[in-house]
Amino acid sequence: SGLTNAQTESARNAPNVTGQADKQPIVFAHGFGCDSNMWRFIAPRYEHMFKVITFDHVGHGRSDPSAFDVQRYSSLAGYATDVVELCRALELEDVIFVGHSVSAMIGGLAAAREPELFDKLVMVGPSPRYIDSAGYVGGFAEADIVDMLDSLDSNYLGWSSSMAPMIVGNPDRPELGAELTASFCRTDPTVAKHFARVTFLSDNRDDLAKVSVPTLVLQCRSDVIAPVAVGMYVRDQLPNATYRLLDATGHCPNLSAPDETAAAIDEFLGVTR
């Protein structure tokens, strides 16, 4: 049944496996409204020394659209289950998991549940809760998130074209905002609306303490989605964290600053080139 499982899995999350078959696996996971293509400037750099896996969350990229299930994906835990099942189906061990944005927390949930499966985590722009609450700065008032979700519901394409450039930052490089807009627009709007709600209303602060594997928290300056206070909070709550504030700005350093992002990952992994 291992084969069937792997076949089901590869249909669901469309994993792409490259690099060295017999080496330690490094898995790259994309953020909201994106797909595995977001890692194209970073993942290939690891192919000469790791087994490299990229994949698409259900509803994104080349994933199987019929696999979308409102119940399963009603919280980030469902996506974490997918990550664990993907690793098992591909028979991965000692996984290095690199998650961008919401996938940083998805990786954290997966590692909290199955710590023996993971060797290290890299969280790029993580946020365990986007909404401010007593003694916690998430970066958004609850009303702002509700307004954002309403506008996303009523006009997904309009929302995408106004939000994507803000998320990416780097206004001097409009092509980055255009790329993220196009990616949002390729995502099934039904799934995107659901995933946005699950992401932006999530509160996984209590799960951080359960993540025992060594974790690199990578943060950018002037990130409207995950402000610096959030990255420092994640660092302080994780039992085994290394924190790195990049010079990069915006929420997508995998697109805007791949050299600096890869260099920080290399340092954390002890990779020399």
Image (cartoon, rainbow, N blue to C red):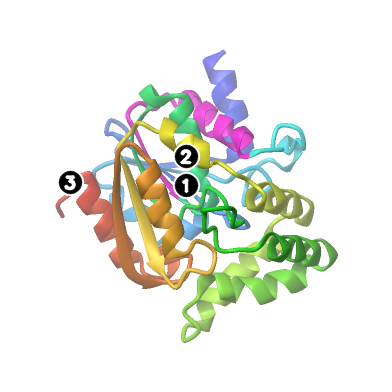
- Which quadrant holds the N terminus? top right
Q: Nearer the viewer, residue 243 or 194?
A: 243
Which secondary structure lies at badge 2? Answer: helix
Q: Position of residue 160 (x, y in %)?
A: 69, 69
Judged from this view, the residue extending furthest toward the right is: 154
Which secondary structure lies at badge 1? Answer: helix
The residue located at (41%, 56%) in the rendering is: 231
User: On the rendered structure, is 175 left or right of 257?
Assistant: right
User: Which residue range is magenta in the image?
Assistant: 76-99
Q: Nearer the viewer, residue 88 or 205?
A: 205
User: On the rendered structure, is 139 left or right of 253?
Assistant: right
The residue located at (68%, 76%) in the rendering is: 162
Task: Measure the C-alpha gap from mark 3 to mark 2.
Answer: 21 Å
State whether residue 40 is above or below residue 1.
Answer: below
Q: Are marks 1 and 2 in contact (CB under 8 Å)?
A: yes
The residue located at (26%, 57%) in the rendering is: 264
Residue beneath disc 3: 270
Judged from this view, the residue extending furthest toward the bottom is: 172
Residue beneath disc 2: 107
Q: Quadrant of residue 248?
A: bottom left
Rendered image: mark on residue 104:
1
